Amino acid sequence: MAELDRPTRPVPRPLPALLTGENADVYFLRSERVLAGDGRNPIVTMEVFCRRAGATLCGIDEAKGLLAIALEADAAAGNAAVWALKDGDLIEAKEVVLRIRAPYQSIARFETAYLGMMAHGTGWATAARAIVDAAAPTPVIAFGARHVHPNIADRLDYAAIIGGATSASTMAGSSRAGRLPVGTMPHALVLIYGDTVEAALAFDRNIESEVPRIVLVDTFRDESEESARVAAALGSKLGGVRLDRASELGGVTPALVAEVRAALDAAGATAAQIVISGGLSLERIAEFKAAGSRVDTYAVGSAISGVRPIDFTADIHEIDGQPIGKRGRPSGTTTSPRLREVDLAAWRAALTPVTR
C-alpha cells in the first residue's frame, strides 16, 4: 500500500467564513439547497487540474486542511476520501493535482476556496521559481508583502519560499515555511536618526546579535561613501549593505554594485555582503548576471507578488461510481500515478489556531 500523504509543517486553520460558505460563489450554496430540497446527495468524484505546464504547485496543502475539516464526518463513515499532490511539486498541463470522493453537499461550497488557494499560491510559487532560477546560485529573498492585502501576506511569502526563495520578510510567512524572517532596515529608520551611521549604531544597540547587521546605505549620501562609513563604525559586526537607490536617480545598476563592492573592500569589509532591491525583475536580474555583478542576495517583491493567478478547474468525473463528464471533457477517473491518498486526520491535527 502506498504511503499516505501527511503534513510536514503546520497548516493555517480555515477561517469561519470559508466553512460557512460566506466566501463561496453563491451558486454553490443554492445548489446545496436545491439538492437538499429534493433529497439528493450523490457521492461524486471531483478532479482538479490546471492547463499550465511546469507550474510549481502551491496552496494545495492548505486545501487539504480545509477538506480535512469539511469531510471529517463523511470520512469517518467511509463515504469520503481525498488524493493529492503536495506543495512544491512541478506539475504538467492537465495533470490531476487533487481528487475528492465525497457526498456532493459536503464539498460544494468549498470549490471556490480550494481553487483560489491553489490559483494564487501556484502563481506566486511559479513566479518565485523563475526568479530563483534566473538568479542562481545567488539567493533570493521575498520582499513582496507590501504589495498585497495583509491578510494574505503570509500566503504570498510561504509560496515564494515553496518556489525556492531562501526566506521572506514577514514573520508569518517565513515561520509557516520553517524559516526565520529576513530584512534590513527601512529608509524611515535612517531618516528619523538623520544619519546612516547613527541608524546603524542604534540598530546594533537594540536588536539581538543573531540578526545580521545589513545597513541601508542610499538614504542621504553616495552609497560608496556611506558603505565605507558604516564599515568603519560597525567593523566586523557589519553583515552587509542594501542598495535600494530611488528610481528617480536611476535605480540600482551593475556599475553601482561594483562601486560599493570596491568601497567595502577598500574599507576592509571584504566579508560584507551586498543585498539589492527595488523593482527587480527577470530582465533586471539577467543584466546583473551578464555584468558579473557581485550581488550576494536579490530581494524581490512585485515580480513575485504581482503575477496573475494560475487558473485551476474542478470537474465531476463520477456520480455514485458511474463515469460522467461535461461535454468536451473526459468522463471517469483520470490515470494519475503521482496522487497519494491524504490522511485527513493527520491534516486536521496539523491545523494552527485561527489568528484573524
Image: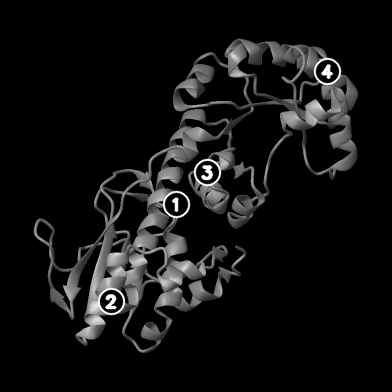
* Nearest to N terminus: mark 1 or mark 2: 2
Q: Is residue 298 left or right of residue 319?
A: right
Helix, strand or loop for disc 2: helix
Proximity of marks 2 and 3: CB atoms separated by less than 8 Å: no
- The residue to which callout 2 is attached is 32
Helix, strand or loop for disc 1: loop
- Residue nearest the observer in this picture, 64 or 16: 16
Gap between marks 4 and 3 measured at Cα: 40 Å
Proximity of marks 4 and 1: CB atoms separated by less than 8 Å: no
Which residue sits at x=55%, y=71%?
350
Q: Which mark is residue 154?
A: none
- The residue to which callout 1 is attached is 88
> Visible in this render: residue 265?
no
Which kind of residue does numbered mark 1 sit on? Gly
Which residue sits at x=84%, y=22%?
195
* Nearest to N terminus: mark 4 or mark 2: 2
- The residue to which callout 4 is attached is 268
Gap between marks 1 and 2 measured at Cα: 33 Å
* Nearest to N terminus: mark 1 or mark 3: 1
Residue 234 occupies which quadrant of the picture?
Answer: top right
10 Å neighbourhood of mark 4: few (<14), some, or many (≥20)?
some
